[in-house]
Image: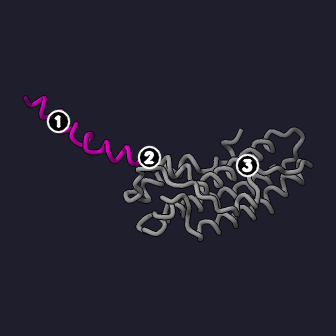
Amino acid sequence: MKKYLFVLAFALPLFISVPSTGQSKEALKSIMANSWVKKYKKLKTDLEEKAYFIKNMENISESDLLVMEKSYKKTSKLLDKWLVDFAGSVDGNKENVTLLSEGSISNDLKEELFAIYTMYSNEFSTRFEEITGMQSKSVITHEQLMKDELSGPIENTSFEKIDRSFFMANIVPPLKPSAWNKIY
């Protein structure tokens, strides 16, 4: 009998948490499908792919490599900050939660992403072109970034319980740019 009570005591929290886990998975899918998160991911991917190309170039000078590393780290730091701001934007802010559930984000986050893209284009991409002698082809253009396309909500997804800790645990890690020394 004690064995059954013991199992029940540990199983009860599991049964109670399953519905919220399901909602969290749906919310996670919806957030990752958000058009602005997709734009962020494209920008991050473009940055990492160019860094990979530079790091694997033959006959690149150490000074050029250091310049690119510094620029990469500066851009990565801004992307990290955007992720933290994105996570913080839904923590207790009903308006931002509503925007997120509709497939959008706040204007402040959009403007911050525009500023990162501008800095990335003017600094990292320009240096990439100077060092490689190749025309930089971005995965995302300024026009695509400016377009406010709504991805729309996924049906039956509740955003009421999403908080900053959920973002920091489930959304930030996969979206975080790789460290320079981790790109091979």
Mark found first going from the N terminus, 3 or 1: 1
- Closest to the camera, between mark 3 and mark 2, is 2
Residue 152 coordinates in the image, percent (x, y): 54, 55
Q: State the SS at label 2.
A: helix
Rendered image: mark on residue 26: 2
Q: Nearer the viewer, residue 65 or 41?
A: 41
Q: Which residues are magenta?
A: 1-26
Mark found first going from the N terminus, 3 or 2: 2
Q: Nearer the viewer, residue 84 or 144?
A: 144
Rendered image: mark on residue 46: 3
Mark 1 touches mark 2? (CB < 8 Å): no
Q: Quadrant of residue 105?
A: bottom right
Q: Quadrant of residue 15?
A: top left
Rendered image: mark on residue 8: 1
- Distance from disc 1 to disc 2, alpha carbons, whole Å, reads 28 Å
- Main SS, magenta residues: helix
Residue 98 vertical position relative to residue 31 in the rendered view, above or below: below
Mark found first going from the N terminus, 1 or 2: 1
